[in-house]
Image (spheres, rainbow, N blue to C red):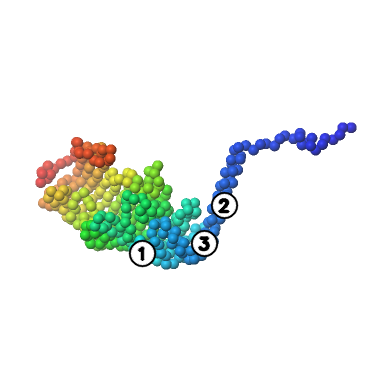
Amino acid sequence: MPLPASRLDLDSDLPPPPRATWGRVVARLAFGVVFGAWSLLLIAWVTLYWGILPNARAWLPQIEQQAGRAIGAVVRIGDLRVQSGGWVPTVELTDVVLLDRAQREVLRLPRVAAAPAVRSLLAFELQFQQLLIDGAQLELRRDALGRVHVAGFELDAEASTAVDGKALEWLLHQRELVVRSGRLRWVDEQRLAPPLELDAVDVVVRNLGRRHELRVDATPPPEWGDRFSLRARLAAPLLAAGDDWRRFGGEVFADAPRIDGGELHRYVDLPFEWSEGRGALRAWGQLERGRLVGATADVALESVSLRLAPALLPLQLQQVRGRLSAQRDARSWTLAARDFAFTDGDGGAWPASDLRLVLQQRDDVRGVAQPVTGGELRADRLDLALMAA
């Protein structure tokens, strides 16, 4: 009678267990890393939501220090309150004050409401899903040397480490900024012009990765005109940083339903002298890598006085209307007018017509324009007698 097989013999008859493949090992490792990272993120967010924010008032010195480091200024906060609303709480601050290097107050924000973004935990910097500011009062000033100061800080377009550069880069990292019922005061010491104050200033800024949108609506003094709007849709180049604002490209737009040119020319540099004129103006501009390469304007003006060059007499026009445009590339300038018509001071009428002038003008390797070498003019109609006059 044969003996029964031992347990060891029975196990040896079983097929060997399958070996774990490299793909399974990598998948398990990746899952472990991702799960661990999300677990830490969840713990950090729960700690922030349930541990830090309910006691936010006790953390005011640290919050002021972090905010000051983010924008490069001294920040003081009067009070702080937290309202829970789902996973994203709302933080409300009152009497937020910015101080310059001499500890002088340069900006006061009566009320600021902010919803912190979850991505702040990944970016290791203070970021908001939405930032709402009510009643902000801001002063912009250009000194006698042409330097622009924002809220007391010098705006340096060349230095990326300047205070304003830090603040602007931080702003471009926020998902949405809204300013309601603000007031802006512009002081131009270089022109010796009276201060200009804009009321009911509303601002909306949205940042979606490399895309940035801006809208500003403001009401000027009555002698200036009616409420106007400024808008911009910009984007960073593909291989540039999303906050490298000096290389942005896109379109800017301005709409002024009623404007007085006599007031405008005292504050804005134009390619010609516009001393008088009232009416409506809409304008578009195209930017490429931070440079203006094209502009278009729809005008409907009356009682206009223009001086195209210092050596020329002013042009007196009763009415002007039409679309004017200019485009610039590395080889030429293109100036055009569409449905352009005007009536001069003596009542002579230029009929609505289309004009197009192309000037051949190349740029050298440094981007400096060279002398004009030729050109081309096209027009569907010309009034030679009126031109001579």
Foreground mark, 3 or 1, reads 1
Task: Name the spot of residue 57 as percent of width and height, x first.
Answer: 48, 66
Q: Secondary structure at mark 1?
A: loop
Foreground mark, 2 or 1, reads 1
> Local crowd at mark 2 within 10 Å, few (<14), some, or many (≥20)?
few
Q: Tags 3 and 1 in contact by the CB under 8 Å rule?
A: no
**Location of residue 373 with respect to 166 vertically, above or below:** above
Report the amino acid beneath label 2.
Ser
Task: Name the spot of residue 326 as percent of width and height, x first.
Answer: 24, 44
For the residue pair 303 and 9, the one nearer the viewer reads as 9
**Location of residue 81 with respect to 10 vertically, above or below:** below
For the residue pair 124 and 220, the one nearer the viewer reads as 124
Relative placement, left or right, of 7 versus 289 is: right
Sequence-earlier tag: 2 or 1: 2
Total number of numbered labels? 3
Question: From mark 3 to mark 1, how far is it between C-alphas?
Answer: 29 Å
Q: Which residue is mark 3?
A: 52
> Local crowd at mark 3 within 10 Å, few (<14), some, or many (≥20)?
some
- Kindly identify which numbered label has been placed on residue 103: 1
> Local crowd at mark 1 within 10 Å, few (<14), some, or many (≥20)?
few
- Whether residue 182 is visible: no
Determine the residue positioned at 38% across, 55% down: 167
Determine the residue positioned at 28% across, 40% down: 366
Relative placement, left or right, of 289 versus 20 is: left
Q: Which residue is mark 2?
A: 39
User: Looking at the image, which residue sits at the far right?
Assistant: 1
Q: Tags 2 and 1 in contact by the CB under 8 Å rule?
A: no
